[in-house]
Image: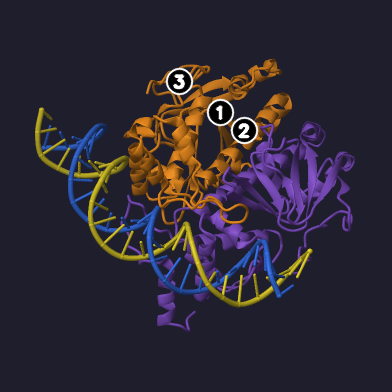
Chain colours: A orange, B purple, C blue, D yellow
Amino acid sequence: MNPSTSPATCQTPRSVSGTAQCGHSTLADLMRMLCTDTTGIPDTQQAAEMAVSLRRVPAGATLIHMGASSDALYFVCSGTFKIFRTDEDGYEQVLAFAGRREVLAFDALCMETHPTAASALEDSTVYVIRKVELHDFSRSVPAFEHELQRAGSRALGRTNELAELMAAVAAEVRLARFLLLLSRRMATNGQSPRRFHLRMGRRDIASILGVAHETVSRSFTALVAARLVHVSDRDVEILDMDGLKAYSRSTRRAQDEGGLVRARRPASPLAMVQKAQSLCPLAA
Amino acid sequence: MNPSTSPATCQTPRSVSGTAQCGHSTLADLMRMLCTDTTGIPDTQQAAEMAVSLRRVPAGATLIHMGASSDALYFVCSGTFKIFRTDEDGYEQVLAFAGRREVLAFDALCMETHPTAASALEDSTVYVIRKVELHDFSRSVPAFEHELQRAGSRALGRTNELAELMAAVAAEVRLARFLLLLSRRMATNGQSPRRFHLRMGRRDIASILGVAHETVSRSFTALVAARLVHVSDRDVEILDMDGLKAYSRSTRRAQDEGGLVRARRPASPLAMVQKAQSLCPLAA
DNA sequence: CGGACTGTTGACAAACTTCAATCCGAGTGG
DNA sequence: CCACTCGGATTGAAGTTTGTCAACAGTCCG
């Protein structure tokens, strides 16, 4: 993957490379990142004077520890984070993956400690806004209040997508949905929706899909065999976007019951695709 | 279930029974409901003058239609709602159940249409706040802005609980977790955490747990056989709270791998409990 | 009473988890 | 530089859970 595909603005306002742990930025920079529609960002003067620190989080580092006292909110500027819970048995349940423009720790706003953890899957940077600053910021820059609400709203929507992934459908379908989710997200970030690099391991994918990691491997193999995608380790290329979308819509039981009766589906959803291809291999 | 167990404040500020579809209330009433800690609710004068409509939603009615244009936010005053998505195949994926004090449609704040639907599982009432009023409200009553953030934050936390329910663990464990979730929620609403009435059908439970509804039935039977709960249709009594909690912590694979190696668990988590009981039936 | 809906239970087949073996790349230390 | 280990990923084999279909009891309602 080429790391500079994004046509979006700066990755980091100032070069924060090397050993720098922390950089300085302003609320105006944050607002510029959050506002997708550039239809006049007011309060720019005010916002330009409000300092916001920009923290660098190296790959693998944990930004938010579960149970730690929560005193700040974060906005991802660059990189990818894994949001997860670790239960007493040590099992890591992944809840979401968050990228640029997404808010972290919004769920801790109403609590003293973080109910979920977040760690960086690659070298990343985040804007840090301490909770005590929140009120001042939204009073000085009303647009910020609005953007904060929107960010929270998006976080909720993002989490609701989880249900789609863990729904009671075949593992292969869950994986297809996951890939399409990533594909859409890549598109909204101005990167290729067809080819991308998975920032997370099979284990994390397994967790968010609610299956064993071996099943993820097998599902990848199945999708490749169906010629819907091409996979090489963590590099994914979607070969048949429409096919993948159609496939992702399969449900185990088309309709639980009630309403019109539909034809029962064959054993495996993919068996259908494969059979169709073996009957007409050139039509693919 | 006795409908008047709650020690909390009024269920509905004015009797909105009969055929009334809509009632009138104030922002102060809403704030009183939202603020758990009554440590001084300022702005009461202001809030008392801001009208908020209170809508009655009969059992089974849909308050929020998926895809409909979103122009308001709702706070549940009484009753229970089911939040769900209906995919093209007609399959209903339940995302959460929301009760008193919870916010509905927060996920639509950043969109023009509702990404999720909400319908009442029993006769319910909601405070309605139109999106265009939001800004005025939080300017006039700063505490409202804070409470709105908290409500959104709680909604996010509530949705994250979903992952716990749909995680890759045995169906019986998921059901145990679900019951404990409800139990906790009953407790925070001042009702008995041991005995309660399920407002939703087996089908809805199955959806949120990510299993077939027959599996829910079987899991109920299993929990009853283990003497952890007593179930009669939709009435549930938790007989062994600690046992249920211990049971809910079982994972399929105690530790995926990495770290210290633990003993492998036997086939079924409940088999363990049952065996223990058969060895020492009086100790239960 | 018939019809529709909910919930329960049984039987069977399919899908999935689990354990195990292997391959591969990255990092480490001789 | 190579052997070595470690972790990630893939694949096979076996056993179990779970989905699916079917039948049935109970309730509500027209």
Name which residue type carries label 3.
Answer: Val
- The quarter of the picture where residue A110 lies is top right
Q: Residue at x 71, y 38 (%)?
A: B68
Q: Would you say the residues marked 1 and 3 are in contact, meaning their CB atoms lie under 8 Å apart? A: no
- What residue does disc 3 label? A16
Q: Alpha carbon of mark 1 to alpha carbon of mark 3: how far?
A: 18 Å
Residue A151, how many percent across, how many down?
62, 33
Q: Say whether residue A37 is visible.
A: yes
Residue contact at pointers 2 and 1, CB within 8 angstroms:
yes
Image quarter for residue B15? bottom right
Which sits earlier in the primary sequence, circle 1 or circle 3?
3
The residue that disc 1 covers is A101
Is residue D28 toward the left or the right of residue B250 in the image? right
Q: Mark 1 belongs to which amino acid? A: Arg
Q: Give the SS element for disc 2.
A: helix
Query: How many residues crowd around disc 3 within 10 Å: few (fewer than 14), some, or many (20 or more)?
Result: some
Q: Position of residue A263 (x, y in %)?
A: 51, 51
Q: Secondary structure at mark 1?
A: loop
Image quarter where the C terminus of chain A lies is top left
Residue B253 position, x and y percent, is 38, 57
> Do marks 2 and 1 share a subunit?
yes
Q: CA distance from mark 2 to mark 1?
A: 8 Å
Q: Relative to residue B235, is residue A64 drawn left or right?
A: left
Relative to B271, is B98 above or below?
A: above
Whether residue B106 sits left or right of residue A116 in the image: it is: right
Residue under pointer 2:
A151
Q: Earlier in the sequence, mark 2 or mark 3?
A: 3
Residue A113 image point, x, y percent = 57, 46
Image mark for residue A203: none
Q: Residues within 10 Å of mark 2 (few under 14, many from 20)?
A: many
Q: CA distance from mark 2 to mark 3?
A: 25 Å
Among the two numbered marks 2 and 1 on one chain, the one whose residue lies closer to the N terminus: 1
